Image: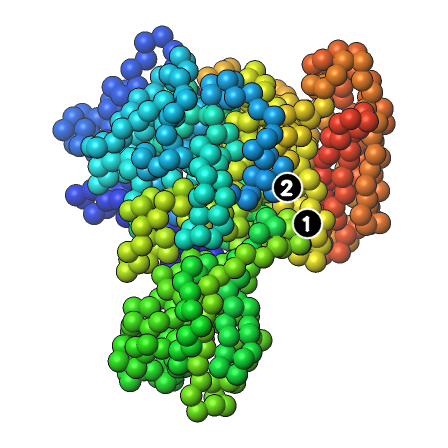
Amino acid sequence: MAKFRTSLFLISLTFMFTGDVSADDNRQAYIVYLGALPENGYSAPSQHLKLLQELFASNSDSASSLLIRSYSRSFNGFAAYLSLAESKILESMKKEVVFVFPSRTYELDTTRSWDFVGLGERAKRESAKESDVIIGVFDSGIWPESESFHDQGFGPPPQRWKGSCKGGRNFTCNNKLIGARFYPKNSVSARDDDGHGTHTASTAAGNPVQAASFYGLAQGTARGGAPSARVAAYKVCLKDIGCKDVDILAAYDDAIADGVDVISISISREAPNILSNSFAIGSFHAMTRGVVTVGSAGNYGPDQGTVANVFPWMVTVAASATDRRFVDRVVLGNGKALTGLSVNPVNFNGTKFPIVYGQNVSRTCPALQASFCAKDCVDRDLVKGKIVLCDEFLANKEAYKAGAVGSIVLDTFTRDVSFVFPFPVSSLSLEDYTSVKSYVKSVEKPEAEILRSEEIIDKEAPYVPSFSSRGPSFIIKNLLKPDVSAPGLEILAAYSPEASPSDNPGDKRSVKFSIMSGTSMACPHVAGVAAYVKSFHPDWSPSTIKSAIMTTATPMMNVMKNPDLEFAYGSGHINPTNATDPGLVYELELQDYLKMLCAEGFGPGLLTKISGRNITCSERTEVKDLNYPTMTTFTTALKPFNVTFTRTVTNVGLPNSTFKASVVTLRPEIQISVEPEVLSFGLLKEKKTFVVTVSGKGLKDGSVVSSSLVWSDGGHSVRSPIVAYSINPFGENHS
């Protein structure tokens, strides 16, 4: 998951190789993907076993014991324990097999947030239609007893729902939480013992719950973006272990066949290409069945090129800040007050405690390690009843383990997130932390009070915090990713009472709501918006809903906060109410993606197996000409360029309407023209094509130039970012 907690160093972690191994230590879990499901009585499980029997010389016992699971409801494939050599043999069976790849393991990457994006409690809703929308949440499970998932006022599930409640022992679904499944080995229930899955599900579709708070902080009415929508929980992640490909693909296989409308997957990954991985395969087949997939961009920022889930048929979401932040103040014995970051509900009630420096509370460690409060360096006898000063952010855990009353730490982790800690902590900037160290050294008995956190108004919001992954995509260069941004910083939502709110095993607090940060929190905001839009337009396709969300997003122009521009926030910050009436949309169908994949070098035989259609690749579409709501081009530094983008828009606003083009150029390095500059529509669903030409004398190496095209009829503003850049980590040109 793209979860963002202090105990996981996710900034540097993209994925870990799975530890799945059978009795034979040379074997591990592999995914064998066979493409679309054939029709006319094809028995996928028996065919999967037959392939394995061929591999093992008809030894059915070996074949059946190594088969982990079949994917046979929405697409065709299986997972099995294989050696590298065996995987290569299967991969060579080109007639049957599309891809073979090892299963990997990934980490899981709101009282105020919905008001901030304009979707308040009084926003216009189609509640009856919204209750027909089903959101599938792929995560760590769900806490079914949470008030966010009570079913008072809900009728029976939609008739088209084909799922079931297989949540395990002592797990009950209802007319709100209509389905549950769990997949990880060693898991016995879909119940959430991590908190992450309950948080994301309630953010997307939780019921309104009044007076929700985290020990009085962030108090208000917590609700999801589509509170009348139904929820189906698919547990694919285990606490402290992660989320495995074999389970993620199984969830896609079930969720699509179950009848979900929207999939929210707050798990991110890098990929070798745009097709041969579980995320791409699952979301591709979801798209072919009319299901919108929303994925998190990842928590690996602020470095460029770290964005994950870059597949064009998925909505990729960056995290942004709302106008509410949490700060924590430290008052020193000399009266000086310093402002740090943390979510601290504890009040010292005016009592000051002695401050001790990490270097002075260790009897075993060298001075440098002791100053960092490194593992096992903090002596319990020397910190009892005291506040520990540590030169490393993550060392707060050592101070807590040793029994200190609090800790003041240098913010070496991330400078713009307030975390929940198991005890009073204040994370200070280098300047303020140095001030505390100077004070400690200058007086005989230094002391301080760590105050209870308070809420402040962040006037700079919205902006993208440092942890959110940035573009460009380094596997598909002429496609802007992320697509949009949504609230993902310090979000209050429902939580599992079995989980530690600070992710510290020693923290035994049990809460119904907690505060979390990450693109994991941003993702279900957009899933909720997708469900909200679908409630107004049940017949809209995934690409239409995606276009509506992107072209109505509010542009974020805080260059000081986000100099990487659209590579930080995509099309902008979500505007849910405007997304229900976008005016024009950029539509994409399966054949459009297949033409693009042809141009990307995927052969007709492979694409025929994936799509279930006869594909010849006689027509190809370059990535830049995919009918996407954004326009992006990579250019070689310092060389003149002239690039054309062809786009087609569909009128979903009013008949007899005229849209005029305007171009906003923020910098003079590029020139942009549009032909024609006026589009006149006589009918709804009428289509018009236009061409955008972008040229320049050459960009500086590593630069990004951002502009936008806006089509307006006086009531609608349909905005498409235009980005030219010369960031090139490759030795060769990619699409």
- Secondary structure at numbered mark 2: loop
Q: Is residue 161 visible?
A: no
Q: Earlier in the sequence, mark 2 or mark 1?
A: 1
Residue that extends furthest to the left in the rendered view of this protein: 61
Considering depth in this image, is 16 or 568 the residue closer to the camera? Answer: 568
Task: Identify the amino acid type marked 2.
Answer: His
For the residues bearing labels 2 and 1, Cβ distance under 8 angstroms: no
Q: How is the image coloured?
A: rainbow
Q: Is residue 481 above or below residue 334?
A: above
The quarter of the displayed image where residue 432 is located: bottom right
Which residue is under mark 2? 573
Q: Position of residue 520 (x, y in %)?
A: 47, 44
Q: Is residue 221 above or below residue 617?
A: below
Bin the neighbour count of mark 1 within 10 Å (Cα to Cα): few under 14, some 14-19, many 20 and up: many
Say which quarter of the image contains residue 70.
top left
Q: Going 52% across and 27% down the picture, which residue do you hit?
A: 531
- Asked whether 624 or 447 is in front, the reply is 447
Identity of the residue drawn at 44% across and 91% down: 444
Q: Would you name the residue on which mark 1 appears? A: 565
Mark 2 crowdedness (10 Å alpha carbons): few <14, some 14-19, many ≥20 = many
Q: Amino acid at mark 1?
A: Leu
Image location of residue 521, percent across then percent down:
48, 44
* Mark 2–mark 1 distance (CA, rounded to whole Å): 12 Å
Whether residue 514 can be seen here: yes
